[in-house]
Image: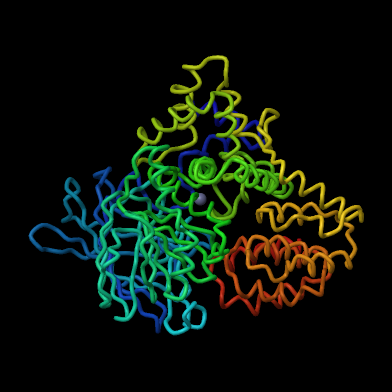
Amino acid sequence: MLRKISVLMCSMVLISCAEKDSYDPAHDYFSYANTDQFFTRHIALDLDVDFESRTLRGSVVLHLDALDSSAELIVLDTRDITVQSAIFYIADGATEVGDFTLSEADDVKGTALHIKVPAGVDMDSEIVLGIEYETSPGASALQWLPPELTAGGKHPMMFSQSQSIHARSWVPLQDTPAVRITYEAVIRTPPELLAVMSANNDPLTPRQGVYRFDMPQPIPAYLLAIAVGNLYFAPLGEDTGVYTEPELLDASAYEFANTQDMLDVAEEQFGPYQWGRYDLLVLPPSFPFGGMENPRLSFLTPSLLAGDRSLVSVVAHELAHSWSGNLVTNATWRDGWLNEGMTSYLESRLMEIIYDKDRVDEERVLAYEELLGNFDVVPLERQWLAPRLESGDADDVQGTIHYHKGQLFLQYLENQFGREKFDEFLFAYFEAFAFKTITTEEFVDYLEEYLLDPNPNTVTREQVEVWMYQPGLPDNAPIPSSKTLSNAAELATAWALGEASLEDVPVAQWSPQALIHFINSLPDDLAQEKLQQLDAGLGLSDTGNAEIARTWFIQVATRRFEPAYQRLEAHLTHYGRARLVTPIYGALAANGHDADLAAELFDKGRDGYHPLTVNYIERALQRAAE
Ligand SMILES: [Zn+2]
């Protein structure tokens, strides 16, 4: 089936036949690792966390199988890592030194570490390779926060964000989702701080500066995660809880009180939860994402602490990754829709059960509109669910297309086959591919065998491939709708025309999603004094809801509503979550007058941002300048 697909791809992007032949959709173009010759099974980390030098220092021991006994070099991924030594552990405590070289650094992929396997190493048994190393203060996965950027202001904090290809900046390894590893770790920190990892965190661990972890389930490298800080724990349910600084502990426990319910419902829907405990970690505002599905311990932005549980769909999303992504993993970043589209779909299913369908429909409409907005800016060949991905950056290739188009595709299947049949399919899918990685083509084959063929005349393979390998949306794509949001859009038009007053806008009864839709539905030519009225009447510049603030400040920047610029600046320096700040920088830089201001604000905020957020903003400013 692969050949058929490559022909399809070739005809659609008009690439030369020579390129077509050499492109392998199952190959990970973002890793140097020679996984066809060596395959890592397990790693053991032993690291000192040094806040003064902002480095991790210590060793990793990799346990590898040789798949090709004639291979002489082990190639690992690294970025900005200083390697001190490579040692092979041979039987009976003997060791042999491995000669190593580092390739020239590539901006996206980092540096390949080539280690020569000494002649004395037995290729038929497990290869044990120890590497002593040190990270750099600028490691792309790690953010080192001084005390003033934490909630408590007294202790420093450090946390990682390994997805997509940043694990290599803190551990030399095979950094591709195609390889799954178990891991153990010993982490040394200042004694007053606590370390947590994407592993078996014990809520009762005494605070003493040496922490041991074990991760018995095999995970891809991008799910390796660590955080160190003045962290405390509050239980949320029998198997769930939250870690954060003491200053945020009560608010976090309140906001995420439904987590245990979500876990129970998810198990009923998608099959057993395979990871032991499910805990949350609420980080400082500079955490670059809404959440990161690190197994057993989802990392979250504090921007979800709206005080009314209105933004907890992010927790449903991260939890759903315990099935789609963490249990069944995309083989390469091009197949990311299998992680993110599937998870967005499961998230909406969970939210329907925990809350109600109306609320989820509101979120579906907002996601759909974001997707349409992406179609305006993402190049056509990147709008496929499974794009041809051999260059560019794994982090930033296609906006939210993997998420929202992927979700719509699965919604389409559900509509066509009915929920019951589709749920049976999903349940079986998670079981069949548990702890495995999967390509888009393997998914389509499985879909054909277990859903399309047994239910003929419903959906054809060709129809599925249109979603996978064509831009935009097929004509039969479902279009989400919400009565509340339609009303909000009508009210926005009526108010702009002077046919309704602000008192007619029932904000108190609305969800934040309805207000967001109202703001996004205002006509382009709205007068500045109307913006003034709106801000004064609804308190938009002072909202405590980060999503409403994001929506409003994008409009403020686009429309050059200068009276709110001071609050806009405060928003940009408070948050480091890329979603909350990047589009505002972009809108400022693109409004025709404020490119210098955008650059100036970025200069001021930059030190407080995670390296990934810095990267996103730089690219947004660059795009606006083009
Ligand atoms: Zn996700």
Camera sees residue 270: yes
Residue 425 in the image: above or below residue 271? above
**Residue 14 percent across, percent down from the top left:** 67, 36
Along the line of sight, which residue is nearer the eye, 249 or 273?
A: 249
Give the colour scheme of this rendering.
Answer: rainbow
Residue 567 horizontal side relative to residue 277, left or right: right
Residue 581 in the image: above or below residue 137? above
**Residue pictured at 39% horizontal, 59% vertical:** 236
Residue 296 horizontal side relative to residue 382, left or right: left
**Residue 473 percent across, percent down from the top left:** 68, 35
**Name of the residue lying farthest toward the top:** 456
Along the line of sight, which residue is nearer the eye, 531 or 595?
A: 531
**Residue pictured at 44% horizontal, 53% vertical:** 31
Image quadrant in which you'd find residue 624: bottom right
**Residue pictured at 48% horizontal, 73% vertical:** 138
Image quadrant in which you'd find residue 233: bottom left
Along the line of sight, which residue is nearer the eye, 65 or 328?
A: 328
Q: How many marks?
A: 0
Quadrant showing the C terminus: bottom right
Residue 522 horizontal side relative to residue 234, left or right: right
Residue 290 horizontal side relative to residue 555, left or right: left
Image quadrant in which you'd find residue 606: bottom right
**Residue 323 percent across, percent down from the top left:** 41, 43
**Residue pictured at 49% horizontal, 38% vertical:** 24
**Name of the residue lying farthest toward the left:** 92
Camera sees residue 592: no
**Residue 116 percent across, percent down from the top left:** 28, 58
